[in-house]
Image (tube, coloured by chain):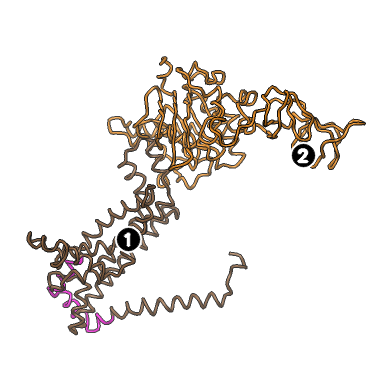
Chain colours: A orange, B brown
Amino acid sequence: MSGMAEAPGSILVAGVTRRFGPGVAALDRVDLAIAPGEFVALLGPSGSGKTTLLRILAGLEFADAGTVAIGGRDMAGVPARERNIGFVFQSYALFRHMRVADNVAFGLRVRPRRLRPPAAEIRERVAQLLALVQLPELADRWPEQLSGGQRQRVALARALATEPRLLLLDEPFGALDARVRKDLRHWLRRLHDRLGITTVFVTHDQDEAMELSDRIAVMRAGRIVQCAPPAELLARPADAFVAGFLGEAMSLPCQVQDGLAAIEGFEPVPVAVPPGPAIAVLRPHELGVQRPPPGEAANGTIRTLRSQGAALRLGLEVGGLALEAEVPESGDFIRGEAVRVTIRTLRHVFPQLEAGSEAGRPPPGPGCRLDRDPVAGTCGAAGQRAPA
Amino acid sequence: MSAATEDPPWLRRLLILAVVGLLGLFLLLPLVAVFTEALRRGWAVALAALADPDALSAIRLTLLVAAIAVPVNTLGGIAAAWCIAKYDFPGRRLLTVLVELPFAVSPVISGLVWVLLFGAQGLFGPWLQRHGIGIIFALPGLVLATIFVTFPFVARTLVPLMQAQGREEEEAAATLGASGWQVFRRVTLPNIRWALLSGVLLCNARAMGEFGAVSVVSGHVRGETNTMPLHVEILYNEYQFAGAFAVAALLALLALVTLGAKALLERLGGRRMGGAL
C-alpha cells in the first residue's frame, strides 16, 4: 500500500456484509475508500444500511464478512473504545446525569491514569472545546436544560475532546427544526474545514448531503450504488435510483426501440440506450410548456400554478401522469388550460432492471470500485480536499 | 385536561373519598391497631417483650437474613435488568417472565421448593446430611427462601427504566474510550441510582417481613431459626398478645421507616434530576 493509506484518518472498507437474522442483508458487500480529511455523506432512504455501516466503522456493530481498515490498520477485533473515533448519535446521547462540562470532559477523565491530563488541563481543554462550539456559557447546565441545537454541539464537543482521528455523525441534523438545521450545517462544514478531521455522516436528506460533503455515497438496499462528488452525481448518475433520489426528479417508465424512447403522452425522444423497457428521469426544468400552436393538439393540462420569483411552477397532467415543470415567468398560463408539454432535454434514461434479479443488478458505480490506493484511486479525487 | 375528558366534580370527589376510605380501612386502621395493641399495657411491657432473649434472637436473625439477601438480590437484579434491557438474545422474553415468577407463585411453594431440594427426603438431602451441612431448618434455608421471594423487586424497578434509557449513552461512553467497568460505574449506575435505591428498599422491606416461604424452611426453632414474623405468630398462638404485638409493631415500624426513606429519596432524586427519575 502507498504511504497515504497509513495516514491517520483514512478509511478502507472492503466487502463488508452484515445480516440481522436470516433474510435480507443490512449491508451487502460494501466497498468504500475515504481519504484523510474528506467529508463524506452516506445518503439513502431509511433501511438502506447507512447507519449500520457507520456503526461498523465505530466498532459498535460488527461485520459478518469483509474488512474495515482505519489509518491503514485492520479493525477486526478492535473494540469501540480503542478506536479513537468521535461518534455523534442522532439523539446526541449526552450523559443526562452530568453537567455539560463533565460531558465534554468524559473522554479525557476515563483515560488510564498515566495518559490522563491533569485536572487543570482538562478544565482548560473543556473550556476551549465549548468555545469552539460556541457554548462557553453553558458549562454548568444539565443536558435537559439545552435546546436541540445546543445538545448537538455539546455532543460534538464531547466527541472532539479526545482528538479523534475520525468523526462519525448519525443523522446529525435529523432532530432539529429547519432554521437551526441550516445554520448548524454551515457551521459544521466550517468547523471541518478548520480542523481537517475526516468526517463521515449519515443522512436521508439529499440537500444536506449536497451542501456539506466532498463526496456522497448513495446507498440502497445495503449497497453503495454510487460514490462521487455531488456535481458528478447530478451530471452522471449511475442508475435510475441515483438519478431519481438526487435533485428533484420524476421517474417515468418508457419503452426504447430503434434509438427512440417512447414515453406515454410525449413524442418519442432519441436516446442512446439498448432497446427494451427503460426508466427516464426528468427534472422539472427539462420540460417545456407552450400553448399548442395552431394545427397541433395539446397533450397536457395545467392543474396547479405557483410563482417562484423568476420561475413558474406548473403542476401538469400528461397522459395520466402527474408531472412538475419549471418554466420562465412569462407565459400567462391559467389553471385548467390545455397545453403542449415537450421534453426539451432527456439526459438520463436507464434500462429497466428485472425486478429481484441479482444478475440484473448494475455493477457498483465507477466511484465505488476499490483501488489499491484510496487516494489516487477512482474514488472521486475531484471532490477531495487537502488535509488541513 | 380538556372538558371532554374531565369527570364532573361530584364524581371526582366521590372517587377520591372512596379511595381514601378504602386505604384508611384496610391499611391505616390495622397499622394503628397494631401500635395501640402493642402499647395497651404501657411502654414498659412492650419493651420487656422485645428484650426477651427469643425476641432478640428473632430480630437479629431477621436483620442477618436481610443483610445477606438484599445485597445478593441487588447485584442479581442489576444483572438481570441489564441483560433484559440492554441485550437482544433468544430467550429474553422468557427471562422477563422468569424474573416475575416469584411474585406469581405462592410463598409457601417458594419455601417448599427448597425443602424438596435440600430437605432430609429431598434431592440433595442425603448427601448434605452425610457431609453435615444443614440448609433446611437453618440459616442458609432462610436466606435462600428470602432471596427467591424478593428477587423481582430490584429487577422489576430497573427494567422499564433501563429500557427507556436505551443503550446509546453506554455506546457513547464506549466510543469515548471508557472500559466496561467505567461505563457501568460512570454512566449506567448514576442513571439508575434512584430507581435502584427504591427497589432495594422495597426488597429489604419484603425480606424482613416475609412469612410464608420462610415459615416452611425455618422449622420454628425458638431462639435459633425464628425470624420476626415467625416469632410474632408463635407468641400470638400462645396467647402472649402483648409480646406478639410489640414485635409486630417493631416490624411495622421497620417497614414504615423503609417506605419513608424511599419517599424521601424519590423526592430528593426528583429534585436533583429535574424530575428525570
Disc 2: CA contacts within 10 A as few (<14), some (14-19) or many (>=20) = some
A221 to B209, vertically: above or below: above
Residue that numbered label 2 is attached to: A315
Distance from Cα at disc 1 to Cα at disc 2: 62 Å
Quarter of the image where one finds residue B269: bottom left
Residues at marks 1 and 2, common chain? no
Which numbered disc covers residue A37? none
Please report, as a chain letter, where disc 2 is located: A
Q: Residue at x 86, y 40 (%)?
A: A337
Give residue B195's position: percent from left, percent from top. Answer: 37, 56
Does residue A65 appear left or right of residue A382 in this picture?
Answer: left
Confirm whether residue A154 shows in the render. no
Closer-to-camera residue (A151/A76): A76
Which region shows up in magenta? B36-62
Q: Would residue A140 appear left or right of B51 to someone viewing this image?
A: right
Count of numbered tags: 2
Residue B125 found in image quarter: bottom left
Residue type, numbered disc 2: Gly
Res. B152 mark: 1
- Relative image position of residue B80 (x, y in whole percent): 32, 53
Image: B274 above or below B176: below
